[in-house]
Structures are given as C-alpha cells and as structure tokens.
Amino acid sequence: MKKILSLIVMLLFVVNALIAQVGINADGAQPDPSAILDTKSTTSGFLPPRMNTAQRDAISSPATGLVIFNTDCNDLQLFNGSGWIPIGNSGTMATPGTISGNATPCVNAIGQTYTITALPGAVGYTWTVPVGSTINGGQGTTALTVTFGTTNGAIFVSGYGSCWRSLGSYLGITLSPLPEAPVAGTHIASATQIIWNWNTVQGATGYKWNTTNDYASATDMALVTTKTETGLTCNTAYTRYAWAYNLCGNATPVSLNQTTTACSSSCGSVTVNHIAGDIAPVAKTVTYGTVTNIPGETSKCWITSNLGADYQATAVDDATEASAGWYWQFNRKQGYKVTDAGTRTPNTNWITTISENSDWTAASDPCALTLGGSWRIPTKVEWTNVDVGGSWTDWLGPWNSGLKLHAAGYLFLSNGILHDRGIDGNYWSSNQTNANIGWYLNNISSLCDIITGDKEYGFTLRCIKETPESPSRR
C-alpha cells in the first residue's frame, strides 16, 4: 500500500513538472494560468527565507529578483541586480529634497543631469524617468544623467538604506520641441530687388536667412521675418531659404521663390553726398537707383526712391522714415526730415503762408541742386502722362510700377506736423495752379490722381531728367 501511495505522489510531481505550475491550497483549486506558483490560505501566510544582514551579504551571486526577510531590519528585501533594496518600508528615512535640473529640456536632449542632496543614512537611490527616456548613468547615486525621448513625464527618486526606503521626490518634465518650418509669405519684387517674407512660427526665438541651403552660414535675422535683397538681375528667378530656431535647435528650412520683374532701361545709379544745410536737413550719403521706359514717359529717367530716402520702400504702406525721404514746401529748397517719432529737422518756424505767382524755379529745385545735371522735379503733364499711361486707379498702380511710389505721408500746412505716413502718398509737381496752389500726384488705397493743394504743405519729391545719359555725381 505504501508503495502505491508513493507512486501516486511521484506521478503528481511529474504532472506538476510537466505543466510547470504548482498550486498550494486546501480546496483543490487550480493555479492561476499566469502563475508558476499559486498559494491560497485564509489562516496562514507566505514565509520567505529569514536571515540577518551578514547572512544575506554572504549569498553568492544572488539572482536579480531574489527576496529575503532581513531580521536585522525586520523588512522584506529584494536584490535588484546591483544591491539589496528594502520593500515597502518608507517611514524611517527622510524624503529627498528638490531635484535640481532642467524641467523643460529639449525633445531628444542628450546627457541632461539631475541631482539631489545626499540623505543621512542612505546607501543608494532609485531613479525613474519618463517613458521613452533613458538613464545614461548615475542610477543609485545622487546625480543622474538622462537622454530624453519625446514624451513628457516626471523624474522620480527615493533613497534607501540597509533597512529602509524613503518616500519619493519628483520633478515634472515638459519637453520643449523644435520649431516648425516657417511658411513663405508674399514676396515683393522689382527689377533689381526682392523683399522676402515668411510667417512667424510658434515657439521660435529667431530666424535665419540664406541664399543657399546652409544653416551654418545663414544670416541671423533675430525676430525679423522679412529680408530685403538688392543688386539682383531683372527677370530672373531666385530661391532663398529661411529657418526658424529656438534653444533646442532649428527647423527644416522653407524654400522662398520669387522672380524679379521685367528688365527696363536704366540711367545708372546716382550717388549723392548730402551735406546738412539749406537743402538737405541732415548729412548722409545715398545711392539712388534709376529707371526709364515708364509708360507715359518712356524716354525719361527717374530715381526709384524718394529724394532723401535711405532706400526704396518695402511696401506701398511702408511707414518708416528711412524710406519716406524728406519733405518740401512748394518752391522751397529746404528739405525736412521727420523721424518715426515725429521729430522734425530742421525744427525752424514753419512757413504758414506761401503766395507767389510762380512755378517751382530751378534755383529752388532740390532735384537739380542735389543730383545735378538735368535732374529736376516732374511737371504736372509728366505726372499726368504716367498716371494715364500706367492706368493708375489706386495706390497699387504707382507701387507696382517701376517707380515704386508709396504712401510716405505729408507735413501739415499750418504747423509742419507729420500726417498719414503709410496711408497717403503726395508727390509735388513743378507747376502751380495759382499763387497759393500747386499740382501734385496723390495716391491712397482708394484712388490715384493729379490734384491741387496749398503750397504750404510738405510733400515728397521724385526727380526726373530728360535723357538716359549717364548722370553726373556730386
């Protein structure tokens, strides 16, 4: 009988070994399919091996996951592959202090360091990092090095001693992304110039622009999203590149494409050393571009920016002093500069009454006095001819022409105060209507026409000459 019972027990062990699961219980229940060992009792507990710290440390090559009960510490302990970690006892060690480190690192940032102050009694520290991030080094110490992925989360740390584990401290991590690539805006082209534009990008702290697809050599534009490029060839296609960047790096570039306008004859540039005095309000050197073949006056040469302007306007509603140039009252050679803040130079008493039966004389013509040669102020007929020849009905007509006329504003007749820069364009002709009134070209968003105005107004000037000969320089 004993042999038969022994045989049955052996068969049970063989069956259990074959199915690799063991259930220990008093009701004959099968072990859970996910468990290799399933114990069940309502009157007894699981008793792991019990030993003191010295005996624990004498275990040769403990397996990762090995569990014992430490009788010195009265605590369950787990070997995590590098050391013995207390399990579930967190009441007898201080919580780590603030985790120091960057809470907003870049996506995929490499080698970010996080530190805590050492805890009294701690022999090691356990760190966790956001999903997708990697601990490069420092696990078990007070300084952790992390390479981040793309998922936000938290860095968590707790300390442990030979017996006890502390509560944990954490630092929330919000990853900062690279900026998106900019989107091209509307570019503004003339025969020799393109004003490149691109849209702002959320999260960008600056932009770069280049003539080639090379970020390293690109021009840093800071937060400016427009770039004026001059000296180009007419009727030619150009491709340029712009990048958005922030502290995390740069986006892929946007390709900017634009063709310069059709070629027209030029009379050569004119470089003028303006000297502050009774004509120029301030001293500066300006190079004026020129253009000819303007519909209505095809044989005349014109400068392509306002007299006194640093450069051609960047838009029809450009409201800057640098592109507005200077302002003149009718038949007066003294020009006035007005800053963007409204300060007028020279700040002399404004002439509030001009009554003289005369067109603009050559002796007072700022075009002739500054550009020399045969340069002069356009006549009323010449303005009328280009207005009709270009079919100008609003300010886009003169702006889209080779003259690039824009709304430079004006100085009010009673006090010389600047009005409507970026809204209203007014260009004197050399002809009067009567002793008090002169003709001028007026262009605003809704109309463009040759009209009359009081001679006390301060209007801008464009200069013209009869033939496309090489201009003299002074």
Image: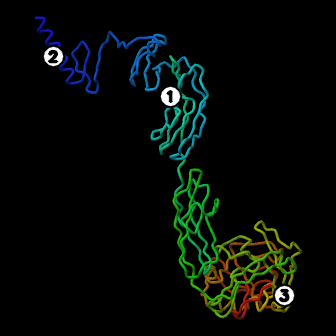
Measure the alpha-carbon separation of dots 2 and 1: 46 Å
Q: Which residue is mark 2?
A: 11
Residue visible at 54% across and 17% down in the picture: 92
In space, the residues marked 1 and 3 are separated at their CA atoms by 87 Å
Of the two numbered discs 2 and 1 on the same chain, state the one appearing first in sequence.
Answer: 2
Q: Amino acid at mark 3?
A: Ser
**SS assignment at label 1:** strand
- Which is in the foreground here, disc 1 or disc 3? 1
Q: Does the residue at mark 2 contact the one at mark 3 (Cβ under 8 Å)? A: no
Q: Residue at x 26, y 14 (%)?
A: 25
Percent from the top left, x then y, of residue 8? 14, 13
Q: Quadrant of the N terminus?
A: top left
Image quadrant assignment for residue 394: bottom right
- Please, what is the three-letter code of the amino acid marked with disc 2? Leu
Residue 469 appears left or right of 337: left
Query: Can you identify the residue that label 1 sits on?
Result: 126
On-image quarter of the C terminus? bottom right
Q: The residue tagged with tag 2: helix, strand or loop?
A: helix
Q: Earlier in the sequence, mark 2 or mark 3?
A: 2
Q: Is residue 442 above or below residue 198?
A: below
Q: Are marks 2 and 1 in contact (CB under 8 Å)?
A: no
Whether residue 432 is visible to the viewer of this picture, yes or no, is: no
**Residue 372's image quarter?**
bottom right
Q: Earlier in the sequence, mark 1 or mark 3?
A: 1
